[in-house]
Image (cartoon, rainbow, N blue to C red):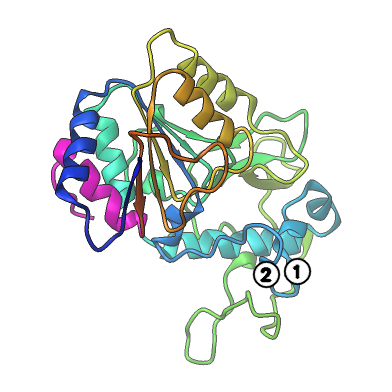
């Protein structure tokens, strides 16, 4: 039977079995989800019931919403950028970055858009961002190819600065009772190349396709003839495709699976087979511990 381990204690024999397989593994695939961001204290705004002010967050994450009210959508994303920058990469981000330096055939697929993996210096050539990145910018003009990666400026423009309380602290503009600044469209981030069109966050909005080049690179790595030895599923239930499909494919190519999450895997794709591992609890605590045999201690 697969092993289930809590944050408080990892049985030595389970850790030894995992570490032995990790050391012997050449090709390793990792899938990261919102639970990894939660370990850094970030709100995720995922799914139905995730609200920002009086708006369901999913309703703001669409091309239609941006076309209808670009100022409101940019205020939402500027808030998310601000909160992500206030958070710090946790020990799991640093551990995975170190593993990428130690294992040349380690590929990480992240469903997170918060930039924490990049800030932990995870090598970009081994990190694929399935849903884009809050800190990437691109022009809304279909005929303009302007893209800017990892712009951590906060705020991007003065009009998007977070309002201050009377004590000089950031106001919590996720609270609908806190008034927003009156931002006009001509005050929003504008493309420096074509001049006349607005920039938008480089995330994948609902109704949009996942980035074609990202999928192509991931599929190319997976389709190489060598087996996949190990798959790490960190902070995600992996219920949505293509994420769920990557677990199935890795298994078909010989991978053992290690799930690190607060909740037991209960979907078909992420259910554990004999010889797999389930490490239950905070990914920020568990991931550095189970990778230590390869990467050494992590100083976050």
Of 238 and 100, nearer the camera is 238
Q: Residue 161, relative to residue 67: is it above or below?
A: below
Magenta range: 282-300
Where residue 49 appears, as percent x and y from the top left, is 70, 67
Give the farthest residue toward the top: 225
Q: CA distance from mark 1 to mark 2?
A: 5 Å
Secondary structure character of the magenta stretch overall: helix
Which residue corresponds to the image point at 70% horizontal and 82% vertical from the top-left? 179
**On the image, which quarter does residue 106 sit in?**
top left
Viewed as shown, does residue 278 lie left or right of 271? left
Query: Which corner quadrant holds the C terminus?
Result: bottom left
Which residue corresponds to the image point at 40% horizontal and 20% vertical from the top-left? 254
Where residue 144 appears, as percent x and y from the top left, is 72, 30
Q: Secondary structure at mark 2?
A: strand
Of 197 and 54, nearer the camera is 54
Where residue 5 appears, as percent x and y from the top left, is 30, 53
| Disc assigned to residue 55 | 1
Q: Residue 266, relative to residue 81: is it above or below?
A: above
Viewed as shown, does residue 224 lie left or right of 239? left
């Amino acid at each position: 039977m697969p092993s289930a381990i809590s944050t408080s204690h990892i049985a030595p024999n389970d850790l030894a079995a995992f570490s032995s397989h990790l050391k012997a593994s050449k090709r390793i695939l990792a899938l990261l989800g919102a639970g990894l961001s939660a370990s850094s204290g970030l709100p995720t705004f995922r799914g139905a019931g995730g609200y920002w002010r009086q708006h369901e967050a999913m309703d703001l994450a669409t091309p239609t919403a941006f076309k209808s009210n670009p100022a409101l959508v940019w205020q939402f994303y500027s808030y998310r950028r601000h909160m992500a920058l206030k958070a710090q990469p946790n020990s799991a981000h640093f551990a995975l970055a170190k593993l990428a330096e130690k294992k040349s055939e380690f590929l990480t697929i992240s469903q997170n858009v918060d930039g924490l993996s990049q800030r932990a210096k995870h090598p970009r050539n081994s990190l694929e961002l399935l849903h884009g990145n809050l800190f990437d910018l691109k022009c809304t003009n279909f005929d303009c190819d302007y893209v800017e990666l990892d712009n951590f400026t906060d705020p991007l423009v003065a009009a998007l600065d977070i309002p201050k309380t009377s004590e000089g602290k950031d106001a919590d503009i996720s609270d609908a009772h806190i008034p927003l600044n009156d931002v006009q469209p001509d005050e929003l981030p504008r493309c420096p190349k074509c001049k006349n069109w607005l920039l938008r966050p480089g995330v994948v909005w609902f109704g949009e396709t996942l980035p074609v080049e990202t999928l192509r690179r991931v599929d190319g790595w997976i389709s190489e003839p060598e087996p996949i030895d190990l798959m790490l599923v960190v902070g995600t239930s992996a219920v949505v495709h293509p994420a769920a499909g990557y677990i199935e494919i890795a298994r078909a190519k010989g991978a053992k699976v290690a799930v690190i999450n607060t909740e037991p895997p209960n979907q078909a794709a992420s259910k554990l087979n004999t010889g797999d591992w389930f490490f239950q609890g905070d990914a920020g605590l568990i991931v550095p511990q189970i990778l230590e045999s390869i990467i050494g201690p992590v100083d976050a």
